[in-house]
Amino acid sequence: MRIDARRISLTPARASIASAIAYGVNVATVSLPGRIDGEMQKRAREAKKATASGGRDEGDQSRGEVKTDDKVYAIPLDSEYRSLFTPAGWAFAIWGAIYAGEAAFVGHALVRPGAVVRDVAPWWTLACGLQGLWCLAFRPWASKPRHFWVSSALLVAEAAALGVAHRALRAAAGTMSAARYWTTHVPLSMHFGWISCASLVNMNSFVAKTCALDTQIAVAFLSSFGAAALGCVVTLRTGDPVYACVVAWALSAVASDGGKRTSETLGDAPLKALAKSARWSARITLACAVASQVVASLAA
């Protein structure tokens, strides 16, 4: 389905205002406390503090035991939401770059609205709304399996909306100024890439809560290969290296995490195989990003 912004009287100025409102609503909903991942971050900070204080927690101290794994995980090892396809904590730092970039996008759009803003705004506004709904759905009230699929579905829908916005960006790439590229194309492409991978992470959490171990393993492998395939296809078809680089970032974080869980019945070999599949998928995706630029330079 294709929406022509000109037919619904969406002028560049109105699109800029809509984008600013959508961004504000997005930031406001993301800032609301009580999300499941907020509790995970709290526990991760506590684990980091415990590690910094000597690698002992209260239970270990009472038994005179010292932790041998000083790694701090973004999703605690005993969390019911932890799957075999989980990124390391450092990967989430990308949100800072995404939100800073999108603040620049909104500011640039308000100061100098243009046709590309008009074409992108409906889909980016929809994506912001879906992310706000995800923030309301990724909470304890929806933690039961019969409700937990909702958050995954919202992220998939958001990725689709960002994908249409990305298509509009690529259609205007030839006429886009350098300033518009850095304030609009780059942050929105980063958001598209990260949400594409986040939807897979959320889906794997749902599978971890509802499916047998063999299904969890299969879905984890398929997620690594699927993310790489998506990154390569989008980048090679559009010539945009940003999307593939973000996918490679996310897959590298999955490989770094390793998928370990306290209740894990898998041996080291399957976990290493899962990590290796994510690592090689990241390398292949990054190679596609480089290849897209080589092809573009040769065609110029």
Image (cartoon, rainbow, N blue to C red):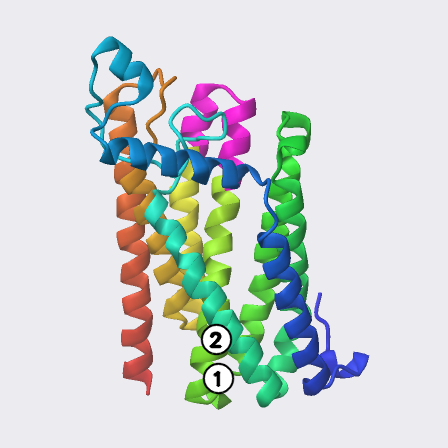
Vertical arrangement, residue 104 with respect to residue 266, above or below: below
Q: SS class of the residue under badge 1?
A: helix
Residue type at mark 1?
Answer: Arg
Q: Quote the CA–CA distance across marks 1 and 2.
A: 7 Å
Q: Which residue is mark 1?
A: 180
The answer to whether residue 26 is left or right of residue 71 is: right
Question: Which residue is at the front of the view, 253 or 287?
Answer: 253
- Choose top left, top right, bottom left or bottom right for residue 107: bottom right
Q: Residue at x 68, y 27 (%)?
A: 146
Asked whether the residues under the numbered discs 1 and 2 touch, taking CB atoms below 8 Å apart as contact, a structural biologist would say yes
**Residues in magenta?**
202-219
Residue type at mark 2?
Answer: His
Residue 280 placement (x, y as % from top left): 26, 46
Res. 185 mark: 2
User: Would you say residue 85 is visible in this rendering?
Assistant: no
Residue 185 colored in magenta in the image: no
Q: Residue at x 27, y 19 (%)?
A: 267
Residue 245 placement (x, y as % from top left): 35, 61
Residue 253 placement (x, y as % from top left): 32, 46
**Quarter the N terminus occupies:** bottom right
Between disc 1 and disc 2, whose residue precedes? 1
Count neighbours of disc 2 (C-alpha within 10 A) and say few if under 14, some if 14 to 19, many if 20 or more: many
Count neighbours of disc 1 (C-alpha within 10 A) and say few if under 14, some if 14 to 19, many if 20 or more: many
Give the residue furthest to the top: 63
The answer to whether residue 154 is left or right of residue 253 is: right
- Choose top left, top right, bottom left or bottom right for residue 136: top right
